[in-house]
Image (tube, rainbow, N blue to C red):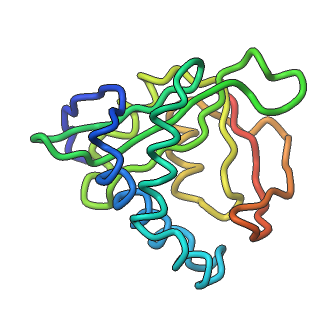
Amino acid sequence: MNRMAALIRRAEPTDVETLGTLHSGCWRELYPTVLPAAVLEELSPAMMSGLWAKFVARGGAYEQYVAEVDGEVVGFAGIGPGREPGYEEAVELYFLYVHPEHRRKSIGKQLLKTVQAHYTWLWAGNRPAQAFYKKAKFYPDSVAREGSLFGAPIEEDRFSG
């Protein structure tokens, strides 16, 4: 693994198009066996850019971060209040993705350290993500759920750190 220092900063409105393209690409790469092809088609860069415009504008307890390498956004993470009853005061990691060419270079670790999340939900079939979080001292806490990802059912496990 080659470590790479990334600049971690808050996402800004000027980032939404880049983030939409990166987010769409990550989903197409990681979820082709989970999400129907029609759903993946809907998650176009333009649609995801629209979502990112809402994420960035939300403010308050909701924070989004980007990782830059040589001025290029190569990863992102988003946090906010816990969504489960009893976890409203906890910080939930809603998402963390890194461009495939920049994975295994400690960029995800830098993002995770910055956001200071208490827990996250992971697709039960995403073994590489589970290994990443375990290495970062996030472990499954015996809570699982049948979630929904853009209308597609998905089994998720909660990992707490």
Residue 137 visible to the viewer: yes
Q: Can you give x and y, in whole percent of width and height, for residue 156 in the image?
A: 76, 54
Relative height, residue 48 to residue 11 (above, below): below
Q: Can you give x and y, in whole percent of width and height, for residue 54 in the image?
A: 52, 41
In this view, which residue lies farthest toward the bottom?
37
Residue at the (61%, 76%) spot, across then down: 39
Residue 61 position by quadrant: top right
Q: Nearer the viewer, residue 80 or 92?
A: 80
Residue 87 position by quadrant: top right
Horizontal side, residue 141 vs residue 76: left or right: right
Residue at the (48%, 24%) spot, across then down: 115
Q: Can you give x and y, in whole percent of width and height, for residue 101 in the image?
A: 25, 60
Q: Can you give x and y, in whole percent of width and height, for residue 27 in the image?
A: 49, 65
Relative height, residue 41 to residue 77 (above, below): below
In this view, which residue lies farthest toward the left?
70
Residue at the (43%, 63%) spot, across then down: 26
Residue at the (46%, 38%) spot, across then down: 77
Q: Which of 141 and 43 is in front in this view?
A: 43
Horizontal side, residue 78 vs residue 49: left or right: right
Residue 103 visible to the viewer: no
Q: How many marks?
A: 0
Relative height, residue 117 to residue 44 (above, below): above
In this view, which residue lies farthest toward the right?
85
Q: In which quarter of the image is the C terminus?
A: top right
Relative height, residue 128 to residue 110 (above, below): below
